[in-house]
Amino acid sequence: MRHLSFKTQSANESIVKRDWFVVDATNQTLGRMSSRIATILRGKHKAYYTPHFDCGDYVIVTNCNKVVLTGNKLEDKEYLTFSGYPGGQKAETAKELINRRPVVMIERAVKGMLPKNRLGRAMRKKLFVYEGAEHPHKAQQPKELKF
C-alpha cells in the first residue's frame, strides 16, 4: 500500500496574493463589522493562513460616521486617552467621538482585535477608513464586501 504525504504549505511573500475590499459602514454594527474586518486583515479567511506571517488583504471602510452602536453604548461607552502627565487622562463618550473623529472609532475597534506586536502593526497599515462614500483607491479595483 502506497502512503501519500502532503506537505503543509507555510505562507510567504511569493505565495500571498493580496486583494482589496471596500466596506460600506452604513447601518453596520461597530463590533460585528470590526471583527470581520480584523479577520480579513489577518488573512484568516484564506486556506494558506499562517499565524506568524501577514497574509491578509487590504480593507477600505467608507461612511464610517454612519456606523451603529447597539443599546446605550452611544451615551455610556467611554474612550479614554492619557497624555502621560499627572491629571492628563481625558474621557470622551462614543457620541462625542463619532461626531468629532468617526475614523478613530473604527480604527480603535479593529486595533483591539489584532495582535499586539509588530505583526499587528503591519496589519493595521492595510486598513483605510474614510468619512464619506468616496476613497482614493479606485485604481486598486476593490471588491465590494457584504456582511
Image: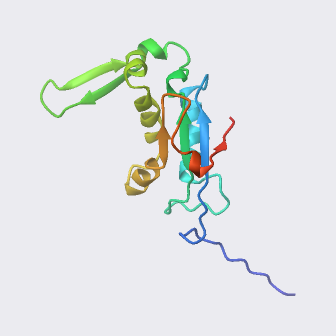
Q: In this view, does 142 lie above or below 106?
A: below
Q: In which quarter of the image is residue 93?
A: top left
- Which residue lies most toward the left here? 86
What x and y, as percent, mark residue 26? Answer: 60, 24
What x and y, as percent, mark residue 33? Answer: 58, 33
Instruction: Identify the image quadrant of the N terminus.
Output: bottom right
- Which of 52/121 is in front? 121
Rendering colour mode: rainbow
What x and y, as percent, mark residue 143? Answer: 66, 45
Residue at 40%, 51% in the rendered image: 121
Residue at 61%, 62% in the rendered image: 17
Q: 36 left or right of 64?
A: right
How many numbered dots are placed on residues in this image? 0
- Which of 74/17 is in front? 17
What x and y, as percent, mark residue 39? Answer: 58, 46
- Which residue lies most toward the bottom here? 1
Instruction: Identify the image quadrant of the C terminus.
Output: top right
Quick check: can you spot residue 87? yes
Q: Is residue 121 above or below residue 109?
A: below
Quick check: can you spot residue 113? no
- Which residue lies most toward the right here? 1
Q: 42 left or right of 97?
A: right
Residue at 56%, 18% in the rendered image: 70
